[in-house]
Amino acid sequence: MKPADFPKLPLIVKPFILSLFLSLSLLAFLSLQTPRHTLKKDPSPDLKIRPGYSSYDAYIQRQLNKTLNPKLRQIWTTRDWNRKVHVFSGFFDSLKQRKLLFNESKALCIGARVGQEVAALKRVGVNDSVGIDLVPYPPLVMKGDFHHQPFDNETFDFEFSNVFDHALYPKKFVGEIERTLKPNGICVLHVTLSRRADKYSANDLYNVKSLIELFKQSEVVKVRSVDGFGLDTEVVFRKNKK
C-alpha cells in the first residue's frame, strides 16, 4: 500500500497528536533528570528526614566524614574512652538489675564507632558482644551498615543504639533490628526529642510515638528521660514471642 492510500487525518486531530507527542517527550526528559535515590516522604509529621542527599552514596560519604575525622577518633579513643565506658557500664549494669540484659546475652551495639559501648558490655560480664559501624575498629567493632545489618535473622538477645538520628531510612533501621533480634529479645534506643540533633543527623524526631510506630513486632517496655551524651530519652522494646 502506498502512503497516499492511507486516509488523511482530520484537521482537528493533528493538534491533539502533536500535543500528546510533546507531553510524552517532556515526561521522558524529566524522568531522566530525576535522581535514582529519591527519598520517600517523611514517616510521620513528628519524624522528619533532612533534605539535601542526592543519593545513598552521598549520605554514606557524609557519615564517613564524621566517622573518619582524625581529631574525633583521637578524642574517642583517648580522652572520652574511660568516661564513656564508665557511664555505659553503669547503664548496662542497671539493665541487668532490671532483668533486661544477662551475662549470657548475645549483644549488638549499632553505630558503635570505636566500641566504647561494647567495652562496657564486656566489663559488666556480657562477653558475647560486638558493634557495627561503617568503619571497623577491631576487635570490638566490625564493618556494617545499620540499614542492612550483616547478620542472620534472630541472631541477638539484646541490641542497643544511640544513633537513630543518623538513619536516613528509619523504617529500615528499625526493620533490621526486629529482623536480627530473637523473639523476646530486648532493644534499647537512646534518642533526642527536646532539641535538634547534630549536623550529621539524617532525621529529626519530635515525638516518641513516631518512633514506637515504626516497631511492628515489638512492645514498649519503658520510656524514660536520660542524660545520655546529648540524648534525652530512652525507649526500651521487647520483641514479641512467636
Image: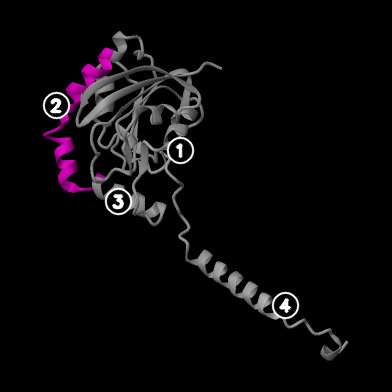
**Identity of the amino acid at label 3?**
Arg
Judging depth in this view, the residue of 184 and 165 nearest the camera is: 165
On the image, the x and y values in percent for residue 155 come to 47, 25
Q: Upstream in the sequence, badge 3 or badge 4?
A: 4
Residues packed near mark 3 inside 10 Å, few (<14), some (14 to 19) or many (20 plus): some
Q: CA distance from mark 4 to mark 2?
A: 78 Å
Residues packed near mark 2 inside 10 Å, few (<14), some (14 to 19) or many (20 plus): few
Instruction: Mark 4 vs mark 1: give the one in front.
Output: 4
Q: Give the farthest residue toward the front.
A: 12
Q: Upstream in the sequence, badge 4 or badge 2?
A: 4
Using the image, tell me which numbered label, if any, was put on residue 13.
4
Q: CA distance from mark 2 to mark 1?
A: 32 Å
The residue that mark 3 highlights is 62
On the image, the x and y values in percent for residue 215 come to 46, 27
Mark 4 touching mark 2, by CB under 8 A? Answer: no
The residue that mark 1 highlights is 172
**Identity of the amino acid at label 1?**
Lys
Q: Which structural element holds mark 3?
A: helix
The residue that mark 2 highlights is 83
**Identity of the amino acid at label 2?**
Arg
- Image: magenta residue range: 67-94
**Identity of the amino acid at label 4?**
Val
